[in-house]
Image (cartoon, grey):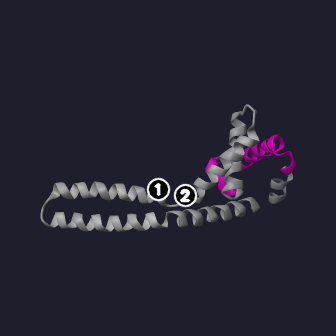
Amino acid sequence: MKHVDKLREDWAKHCRVHCWKYRDKVRALNEKVKTLQIERDSYLGIHEYHNADMKDEDIEIAKKQLKECSPIKFQEFAKREFAKDYKEIVGVHDLTEQDRLFFRIYFYREYLGSKVNDVIKLLGTNYKAYYKVYSAGMKLFFPEDETQEISEVG
């Protein structure tokens, strides 16, 4: 779980930097959306529906730009970090279906901080299959960390 805490700290730092970087643009876009909504309402008031539709399109574009300026969610950040680590870990191995399942389990456990029961429910498997896949993957890819999961259950 130390890894998850570190990821959350890195994500929070990323969000702070991102918010600081885009604060002026976000402020300007929020003002633009408010102005466009007022203009749209005024067009609707005088029954100019074509112009109101054009303002609706402009509002949607501004909202899309606002969404692009907002920081990413933790799950997206964790996926990016996992992708970087995954390339290093896997290297030149040809992955089997069991290896892919192991990395799915590993992502949920080590990057999102999910509990064993939650991962088992999410993957639709049972405890025996979960531990078989997990222990085989740990032996293959992380031989130094192999005893960590066993001690958690015991």
What is the secondary structure assignment of the residue under circle 1? helix
Front residue of 2 and 146 = 2
Drawn side of residue 137 relative to residue 83, left or right: right
Location of residue 121 in the rendering, given as x and y in whole percent from the top left corner: 63, 52
Q: Residue 148 sits in which quadrant?
A: bottom right
Residue count near mark 2 (Cα–Cα under 10 Å), binned few <14, some 14–19, many ≥20: some
Residue 68 numbered mark, or none: 1
| Relative height, residue 76 to residue 27 (above, below) | above
Residue, disc 2: 72
Query: In the image, which is nearer the foreground, mark 1 or mark 2?
Result: 1
Residue count near mark 1 (Cα–Cα under 10 Å), binned few <14, some 14–19, many ≥20: few
* The magenta segment: 117-145
Task: State yes or no: residue 37 in magenta.
Answer: no
Q: Amino acid at mark 1?
A: Glu
Q: Residue 56 sits in which quadrant?
A: bottom left
Q: Residue at x 21, y 59 (%)?
A: 52
